[in-house]
Every structure is written in C-alpha cells, then in structure tokens.
Image (tube, rainbow, N blue to C red):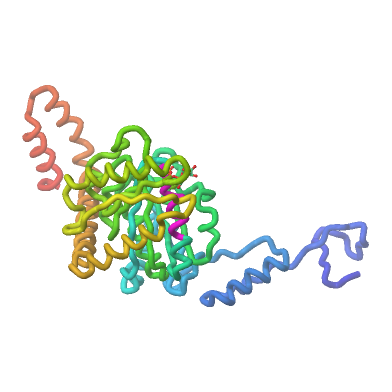
Amino acid sequence: MNEKIKKPEWTPENAGSEFATHVLPAVQNDYPKNNKKQRDDKEISLKKDNHLITPKKNLALNDYKEGILSKDKTILARAITLIESNADKHFDIAQELIKEILPYTGKSIRIGITGVPGAGKSTFIETLGLYLIQNKKTPAILAIDPSSTISKGSILGDKTRMEILAKNDDAFIRPSPSSGNLGGVARKTRETMLLCEAAGFDVIIIETVGVGQSEVTVRSMVDFFLLILIAGAGDELQGIKKGVIELADAILINKADGDNIISAESAKSQYNNALHYLADATPGWKTKAFTCSAIENKGIDDIWQVINDYISYTKKKKLFADRRILQTQKWFESMLNEAILNNFYKKDTVKDNLQHIIDKILNNEITPVVGVRMILDEALIRK
Ligand SMILES: Nc1nc2c(ncn2[C@@H]2O[C@H](COP(=O)(O)OP(=O)(O)OP(=O)(O)O)[C@@H](O)[C@H]2O)c(=O)[nH]1
Ligand SMILES: [Mg+2]
C-alpha cells in the first residue's frame, strides 16, 4: 500500500482497500507576503496543483501601502473595500492608510462625467479608456451612483458595459459603494480616487447619472467636468437642469453616427448658442459643445485634446491648483458639518426632546425660533 495515503482514525488496523476513504495532508500556508511576483507565482502553482483554496490573509497597514504603491490591483481593490466598510475597526486603519499614501497622490487628471441615463456615458468611458491606454495612459474608472443607494445596484455593477476595458491590465474599474447616503458615497469615492492615484493611475474618471445632486458632488472632486447628451431626445435640455450645464467644462453630444449625425450637429449648434448666455464654469474658459460617437470611436481624440487644452489653460492661470486647494478645504468643511450633525442628532437630549418641541410648534405654543433655541440649549449648554 502507498505509504502517503493515510487512513482516517476510525478504520480498523491493517484495513485493506475495502476502505476507500483516506486523508489528504493539509495545505501549508506559506503564502508570500510582500512580494507580488512571488505571490503571483504561488497563485499559479496553487491553481496548477488543483487546490481549491486561495489563502486570503489579513493584511497589515504596510502590506496595503506597499501593494498600492507597487500597483497591485488586488491589494488596491481590498484597500478600497476597507475604505467602503462601515465597521469602526476598518475606519481607523483606512484613515491611517490614506495618511500614508497622501504624499503619492494628486498627480492625475481628474475627470467627472455626467449625463442623462442611457446617453452613452459608460460606452464613451470605455472608448476613451482604450484610447488613453493606446496613448500610454492608465485610467481608473469610478462611479457615484445615487440610485444604487435605493436599488442596491450600481451603474457600473453591470461590467458587461465596459467588458473590454475591464479586462485590460492598464485600467482599473470600480463601481460605487452600494449603500449609504450621497455624503458617505462621496467620501468613499474621493478616498478611492486618492488610492488610485497613489497606485499610479494617471487619469481618474468618475461617472455619475445627471439627474440629481450627485453631479454637484462630482464637480467638487474633479478638475474637468464633462456633460454627455444626445440629440433628438425631446426638448433641447432633456430634463437636464440649467444648473448642470453651468457646471460643465464641455458638452459632448454622443451617438453622432448613422442617421443621427445631422441631428447631433444641429444639437451641437443649439447648445453652443445657449452657452453664450451662461456664466463660465471655470473663469475664462469658454465651454463649448462637441459631437462624438462612442460606438464608432469618432471624436474621441478631439475631446481628449479639449481636455488637455483645458488642463494647460487652468495650470497656466493657476486655476488648477487653486481649485484643488478649495476642493480639499470644502471637503473638510462638508465632512465636519456631517460629523457635527450626526453627533448632534445622536445625543439623548435631542432624541428625547425633538418630537416634543415639534409638537409644541405645531400647536402654536412656541415659535420655531424658540424651538430651535430650546433644543440647542438642551444639547449644547446643559449637556
Ligand atoms: N448609436 C450609438 N449608440 C450608443 C453610443 N454610445 C452608447 N450607445 C448605446 O446607448 C445605450 C446606453 O449606453 P450606456 O453606455 O450604457 O449609457 P450610460 O449613459 O452609461 O447609461 P446609464 O449608466 O444607465 O445612465 C447602449 O445600448 C449603447 O450601446 C453611440 O455612440 N452610438
Ligand atoms: Mg453607465
């Protein structure tokens, strides 16, 4: 009998081959820690040996940092998961990690893309992403999807929409976190952007649906903001609020292909006319409309040129650096506001008295101003 085949304890001594069960030796956990090449080799050898378990050990702060700085996409993805976690124990290490990688951030071009559902944002991003890779750039694609907080889905969850880009080694695609309010999702996206920059991705693209508040949030974390529209979808402004157009540094009429070319060109002229009457989104930069076909890969180089012209212009005028400083300051202020509010509403005195005071106001016993004073007195002074 083969000596390597061990029988389970319960088989009789000197048992023969009638007992088919045998025990396999355990898998040794000699998984290499810091070296990506060794780890990849180990993964391959484990797969070759037909072992079903890939060890997934907890990473220390330094493992995350080194993994990110060496552009290990698996570790980058795990670090983002850490940032997205709502558990207190993850919060501290995630914040520590951001502090560690901060010196390596800030070198990318940050682009926000918004537009009505179905305008072709994801298709455009995939085409642009592949174009960038051809031009020796490395894009990271993130999403802010306010609808995902309700549906628990995600606009980029359906990876089939960027199938080719998702398989490309030089790109990184991450759907938005699927729970939490917009403030929380925005914080996580901003921090994810920093991790991607530290990993060396040099163009960060953030997609969001242009139907609510999220485009304002995205504008507050990017250098260049692009609005994608389509021609012939009803009225000229397609339910996109004038306010969103005022945020855009360029407007792109997508699907300018086939029978659509003429109407796309005419929509472009209409938008260019309308833009004359709007304030500049970025001081001194004239927002213009362009056409493209994301599917037929037309007009992509033109819009990339516009983005580059914009970056050169804003850098020359110091607007680029100033905006980033302002964005960091606003980011801090909005997080501080959020924390103060959370803290305030968590207080027992507020929880206990709020409804009581609202009732008094509704019964005309006190005015709203007095109600505010009462609740603030309770929460801030007495406690
Ligand atoms: N003809 C044509 N169709 C396009 C083009 N770009 C996208 N589409 C189609 O438009 C549909 C929507 O494209 P998506 O890229 O998913 O649009 P989206 O704006 O990301 O959609 P949401 O994320 O759901 O808001 C798909 O069926 C695409 O194939 C284009 O340039 N020309
Ligand atoms: Mg999409």
Which quarter of the picture shows residue 335?
bottom left
Over which residues does the magenta segment extend?
119-129
Residue 148 percent across, percent down from the top left: 41, 43
Magenta residues: mostly which secondary structure? helix
- Judge from the rendering whether residue 43 lies leftward or rightward of residue 380; answer left or right: right
Horizontal arrangement in the rendering, residue 169 relative to residue 247 (left or right): right
Q: Residue at x 28, y 65 (%)?
A: 311
Res. 84 in view: yes
**Quarter of the figure with residue 112:** bottom left
Asked if residue 344 is among those painted magenta in the image, a careful observer would answer no
In the displayed structure, does residue 154 sit left or right of residue 315?
A: right
Q: Which residue sits at x=71%, y=68%?
A: 48
Q: Position of residue 285 (x, y in %)?
A: 20, 58
Image x and y of residue 337, in percent: 20, 51
Question: What is the total number of numbered labels drawn onto the structure image?
Answer: 0
* Residue occupying the point 9% across, 37% down: 374
- Look at the picture and state if 43 lies above or below 329: below
Question: Was residue 120 drawn as part of the magenta stretch in this picture?
Answer: yes
Q: Nearer the viewer, residue 336 or 326?
A: 326
In percent of the image, x 87 and y 58: which residue is there? Answer: 20
* Residue furthest top as drawn: 363
Query: Residue placed farthest to the front in the image?
Result: 262
Quarter of the picture holding the N terminus: bottom right
Q: Report the front residue among 128 and 11.
A: 128
State the image coordinates of residue 241 (x, y, percent, origin top left). 26, 39
Q: Is residue 192 visible?
A: no
> Between 36 and 381, which is closer to the camera in this rendering?
36
